[in-house]
Image: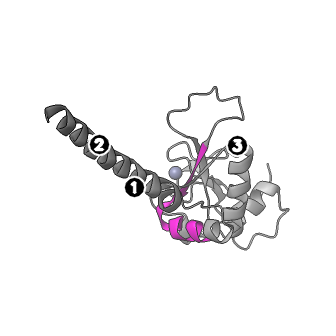
Amino acid sequence: MPATGGALVCPSCDEPHPPDERFCRRCGMPLVYSDAVGNDGPITERHARARKIKPQYAEGELVRAVGAHNQAEAEFIQGMLLEEGVPSTLRRTRGFDVPDMLAAGPRDIMVPASGYCAAREVLLQAELVDDEQAAAVRPSRLLAGLLLAVSVVALITWIGTLLT
Ligand SMILES: [Zn+2]
């Protein structure tokens, strides 16, 4: 047993975990080493990851920062967020029931509520937030409304011609 290395804990709920765990069993947050700060021991990849996480971005409920089209894209985004100190975890986007072993299928990238703004900032700068709400949803809703209005007018006109 190594004397150093520290215990893996959840940055959000302080739950301790065995060293082979990567994510909190309770809330799904990526685990960090309890002594991650100021440890000069050998740096493993996971250890390096844990060190980058800023505690102020690791608090609160998990919220959806952005969606990715597949596992690879999601992991890429996670890497970018981590560079800014924002921990994240992936969830399969609801409504897409693909077996877990498949790397296909969209993912939601979840971040702690306190890291949400920082995450969105990173994504905006990387132009990875395709302004889902602004660009896609709003115009299509507008168009749907417009089409409905037009069809109502057409219907009324049509009824009018039948009655005269
Ligand atoms: Zn937790």
How far separated are the C-alphas under marks 3 and 1?
Answer: 32 Å
How far separated are the C-alphas under marks 2 and 1?
Answer: 18 Å
Three-letter amino acid code of the residue under disc 1: Leu
Q: Nearer the viewer, mark 3 or mark 1?
A: 1
Question: 107 or 14, which is in the foreground?
Answer: 107
Circle 1 Cα neighbour tier, 10 Å, few/some/many (<14 / 14–19 / ≥20):
few
Query: Residue 115 falls in which quadrant of the image?
Result: bottom right
User: Residue 94: horizontal and vertical position, in percent?
Assistant: 50, 37
SS assignment at label 1: helix
The number of callouts visible is 3
Name the residue beneath numbered marker 3. 71
Q: Is residue 67 something that shows in the picture?
A: yes
How far separated are the C-alphas under marks 2 and 3?
Answer: 47 Å
Name the residue beneath numbered marker 2. 154
Quadrant in the picture for the C terminus: top left
Residue shown at 64%/69% (left/top)? 122
